[in-house]
Image (cartoon, rainbow, N blue to C red):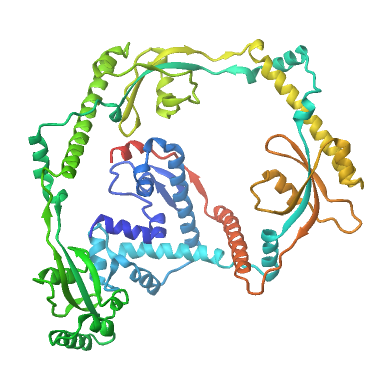
């Protein structure tokens, strides 16, 4: 029970391993620089490396085949890992300063509940020591880590578990979540005013002169490239039959042998509180079967398996390894249909097994069409991978030996020399969107020296080599190039201002008592009704919904509740609140409880954030240096 088991423990004890591992590690000989000081503790490169590797592997397992290491922003990823380590160390240090403790019994209770340390549902001291020893740990070391982690959890719980919501707050949260509003909307479109805006050439030039820094054309480059991909390799012809025969012989046992199956029924006598009495009953049931008793009727009467007893104990077809080991051995030891086993002890109880039918195993013949298709697919897959591997090596050599052209590599590897569109340091389309390609395109060797790049991996089995075709330095755009855009911007700005002014004028008129319909008619816009609008509405513009729900209810005799807001598309809306529709919760409503719980969690999170600020005043944090770039370590692991 080596590494995988302990990483399973890590999943259960995430709080332990989130804090520990801080300090020197045998994985890192020699220098182990301090990345940050948190109170009296140090967060070291070794601790960071351990945390980084765990996070990386968790991400790899979570994403599976979709994982692409080239899409990881390494700087952000490393920063996140380091921040988490500092956060956990801060909590640990503060808990120590405040005198939090974890008793021996608390540590035992926690450790004894971990499934990896249990046998038959009970904590096993021998298994506990064995698992730890196989991973280079002793109980004292592990329990010290658990103790520290429990202290941190006491600190967290002391903040999070004390947040509470009184009934009035719960009702207010419910109201915020469930109340709807009736409103009216008047929409003022800048496009309507744009037709009346005139912009002169002098205004365009004045804007250009005042904003020249906004009209800098960035450095850009156009590339030639060749692309080598496994999917683009020539089709692999079918081999000689003897080649497929060799693959068949090597894989026959694993891939082309259909294992035998057995159809079975059983009667399960569960242990209950008296295992000996259960065995006695199982022997009695076997005796009844041998005396001619009906197996199906006895299963309905005695079996403790609710899934099969009403079906006469039928389990259907079973292959080897599908059941408990003891059951499996007994079933496949039965000779012929109708044979019944003696009671077999498993972890579920005493099993009485009847063999109902047998499907013998068989080997699929070499000339079977399905077998031939699988063999050919296997051969072609391996041959294609080998050819791609050879082509990779050739590509690297050819572009290195011929740095001034892609033609030699393209000719020998039968690749097409292709061209990208212009790209800047922000990237471009196609391969130019890949960060590694962008970095290479603006490197000195490609941009200044005009050489081929090294092969760049853009996918699991896809490499490109690039070289500069054309390049342009950063330059000031001319007035002629940008005048049309400036003119459109000035017209848009002026039209937007007129729309905003018209909306503000409408708001003032409505607040002054003018009827909404009259104001809309005078402004040349329509009135749109919004009935029973929800705070979580997604069909309307989010700024519109926010503006409506920010409006106060107008008291009797007070001015109409109205406001204006700018929408995401640049239009201006005037919103008028007509009514607030409240929904009273039912007494004891689970939704009311959920609202209270959600509000309580939000309060708890805010209180923990505030408490964290206090902790940082008590336990000082000093960052010493950035972690070493370990991306290469991961790629090679």
**Image-quadrant location for residue 637:** top left
Please state if 222 lies on the left or on the right of 352 as rendered. Answer: right
Rendered residue at 68%/45% (across/down): 540
**Image-quadrant location for residue 136:** bottom left
Rendered residue at 15%/58% (across/down): 259
Q: Is residue 371 above or below residue 464?
A: below
**Image-quadrant location for residue 104:** bottom left
Give the image location of residue 97, x and y in percent.
Answer: 50, 61
Give the image location of residue 567, x and y in percent.
Answer: 71, 39
Task: Tell me the quadrant of the picture where the N terminus can be found.
Answer: bottom left
Asked if one can make out residue 400 in the rendered structure from this viewpoint, the answer is no
Question: Which residue is nearer to you in this view: 173 or 183?
Answer: 183
Give the image location of residue 474, x and y in percent.
Answer: 54, 15
Question: Which residue is nearer to you in this view: 465 or 30?
Answer: 465
Q: Is residue 5 above or below residue 514?
A: below
Q: Is residue 146 above or below residue 192?
A: below
Asked if one can make out residue 568 in the rendered structure from this viewpoint, the answer is yes
Rendered residue at 50%/26% (across/down): 426
Q: How many marks?
A: 0
Give the image location of residue 192, x and y in percent.
Answer: 78, 29
Rendered residue at 30%/30% (across/down): 231
């Amino acid at each position: 029970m080596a590494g995988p088991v302990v990483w399973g423990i890590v999943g259960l004890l995430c709080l332990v391993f989130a804090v520990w591992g801080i300090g020197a590690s045998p994985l890192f000989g020699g220098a182990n620089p301090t990345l940050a000081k948190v109170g009296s503790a140090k967060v070291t490169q070794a601790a960071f490396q351990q945390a980084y590797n765990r996070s990386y592997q968790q991400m790899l397992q979570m994403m599976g085949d979709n994982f692409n290491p080239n899409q990881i922003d390494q700087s952000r990823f490393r920063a996140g890992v380091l921040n988490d380590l500092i956060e956990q160390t801060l909590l640990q240090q503060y808990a120590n300063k405040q005198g939090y403790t974890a008793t021996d019994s608390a540590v035992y209770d926690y450790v004894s509940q971990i499934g990896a340390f249990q046998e038959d549902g009970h904590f096993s001291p021998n298994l506990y020591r064995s698992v730890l020893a196989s991973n280079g740990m002793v109980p004292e070391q592990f329990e010290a880590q658990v103790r520290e982690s429990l202290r941190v959890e006491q600190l967290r719980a002391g903040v999070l578990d004390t947040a509470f919501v009184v009934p009035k707050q719960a009702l207010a949260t419910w109201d915020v979540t469930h109340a709807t509003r009736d409103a009216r909307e008047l929409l003022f479109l800048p496009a309507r005013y744009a037709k009346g805006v005139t912009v002169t050439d002098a205004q365009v030039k004045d804007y250009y002169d005042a904003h020249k820094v906004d009209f800098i054309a960035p450095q850009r480059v156009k590339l030639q490239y060749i692309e080598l991909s496994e999917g683009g390799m020539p089709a692999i012809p079918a081999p000689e039959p003897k080649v497929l025969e060799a693959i068949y012989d090597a894989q026959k046992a694993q891939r082309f042998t259909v294992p035998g199956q057995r159809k079975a029924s059983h009667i399960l006598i569960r242990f209950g509180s008296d295992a000996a009495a259960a065995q006695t009953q199982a022997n009695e049931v076997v005796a009844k079967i041998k005396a001619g008793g009906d197996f199906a009727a006895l299963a309905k009467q005695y079996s403790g398996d609710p899934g099969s007893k009403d079906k006469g104990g039928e389990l259907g077809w079973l292959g080897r390894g599908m059941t408990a080991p003891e059951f499996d051995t007994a079933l496949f030891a039965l000779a012929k249909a109708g044979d019944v086993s003696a009671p077999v002890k498993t972890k579920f109880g005493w099993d009485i097994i009847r063999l109902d039918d047998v499907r013998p195993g068989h080997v699929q013949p070499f000339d079977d069409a399905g077998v031939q298709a699988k063999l050919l697919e296997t051969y072609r897959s391996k041959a294609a991978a080998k050819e791609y591997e050879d082509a990779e090596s050739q590509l690297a050599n050819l572009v290195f030996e011929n740095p001034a052209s892609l033609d030699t590599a393209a000719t020998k590897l039968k690749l097409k020399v292709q061209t990208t569109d212009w790209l800047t340091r922000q990237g471009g389309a196609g391969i130019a969107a890949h960060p590694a390609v962008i970095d290479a395109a603006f490197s000195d060797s490609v941009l200044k020296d005009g050489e081929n790049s090294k092969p760049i991996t853009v996918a699991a089995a896809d490499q490109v080599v690039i070289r500069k075709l054309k390049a342009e330095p950063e330059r000031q755009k001319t007035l002629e190039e940008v005048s049309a855009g400036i003119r459109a911007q000035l017209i848009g700005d002026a039209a937007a201002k007129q729309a905003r002014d018209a909306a503000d004028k409408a708001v003032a008129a409505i607040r002054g008592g003018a009827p909404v319909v009259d104001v809309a008619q005078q402004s040349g816009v329509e009135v749109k009704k919004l009935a029973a609008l929800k705070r979580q509405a997604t069909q309307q513009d989010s700024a519109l919904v926010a503006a409506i729900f920010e409006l106060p209810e107008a008291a009797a005799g007070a001015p109409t509740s109205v406001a204006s807001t700018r929408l995401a598309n640049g239009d201006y809306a005037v919103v008028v609140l007509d009514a607030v529709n409240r929904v009273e919760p039912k007494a004891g409503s689970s939704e009311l409880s959920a609202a209270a719980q959600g509000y309580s969690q939000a309060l708890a999170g805010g209180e923990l954030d505030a408490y964290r600020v206090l902790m940082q005043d008590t336990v000082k944090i000093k960052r010493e240096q950035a972690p070493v770039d370990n991306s290469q370590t991961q790629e090679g692991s």
